Amino acid sequence: MQYSSRHLEDLVREIARLPGVGGKTAHRLAFHLLRVPAKEALALAMAIEQVRTRVGICAECGNIAETQPCHLCADPKRDRTQLCIVEEPSDVILLERTGHYRGLYHVLRGALSPADGVGPEELRFPALCERVEQGAFREIILATNPTAAGEATAHAIAELLTGAGRRITRIARGVPVGSELEFADQVTLIRALEGRKDA
């Protein structure tokens, strides 16, 4: 689509690059930003700038963080004998919302996918091994998504970390197979955590 403004065209193109946003939606959002008061549009721009400049990755767990370590790793009230392994930072947020889990996390930043060139090195496996070696974890909870890639990742981690008196559990199948944690409700997540079993 041809726009009368190069800047508007640039905005539509950038919005369309967001996941799940097509050309029509990008067009609607761009025109919405033109209609709202400048203060609102600039607040969005500032929020994006702040998140890009002030939010990083926790060197310890791989979660999003504004401090090093993140607030969860630094919290002395967390159970340091439990480590929950998830694929993405969004999974940490979902599990935290349940209020049920009080241990630590390790965020892989994806799942194994050899076809896409995603192996253990790209998924923070080395950092996980080092962390488990140095920590006093009695239980490792595998909370990867119940997809083919998530299952393969959980299996690889279970094989890698078996031994040394650690219990390795997998979240129960309260989360539907083929789905992702992001789409599960809190009750389902609580049941999945409660029903975890040896991997």
Image (cartoon, rainbow, N blue to C red):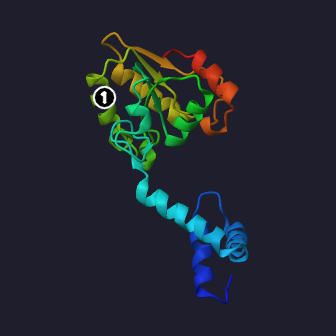
Please identify the quarter of the rendering in which residue 99 is found. Answer: top right
At label 1, counting other C-alpha atoms closer than 10 Å, the crowd grade (few under 14, some 14-19, many 20 or more) is some
Check the image and report above or below for 79 versus 7: above
Please identify the quarter of the rendering in which residue 191 is found. Answer: top right
Q: Secondary structure at mark 1?
A: helix
For the point 39% across and 46% down, which residue is it?
A: 57
Viewed as shown, does residue 121 lie left or right of 185?
left
- 79 and 183: which is toward the camera: 79
The residue that mark 1 highlights is 131
- Residue 30 location, x and y as percent? 67, 73
Check the image and report above or below for 115 versus 145: below
- Kind of residue at disc 1: Arg
Q: Residue furthest top?
A: 165
- 112 and 96: which is toward the camera: 96
- Residue 1 location, x and y as percent? 68, 81
- 107 and 93: which is toward the camera: 93
Check the image and report above or below for 13 versus 5: above
> How many numbered marks have been drawn onto this rendered protein structure?
1
* Residue 47 seen from this side: yes
- 88 and 186: which is toward the camera: 186
For the point 55% across and 67% down, which residue is it?
A: 45
Please identify the quarter of the rendering in which residue 187 is found. Answer: top right
- Residue 38 location, x and y as percent? 65, 75
* Residue 107 seen from this side: no
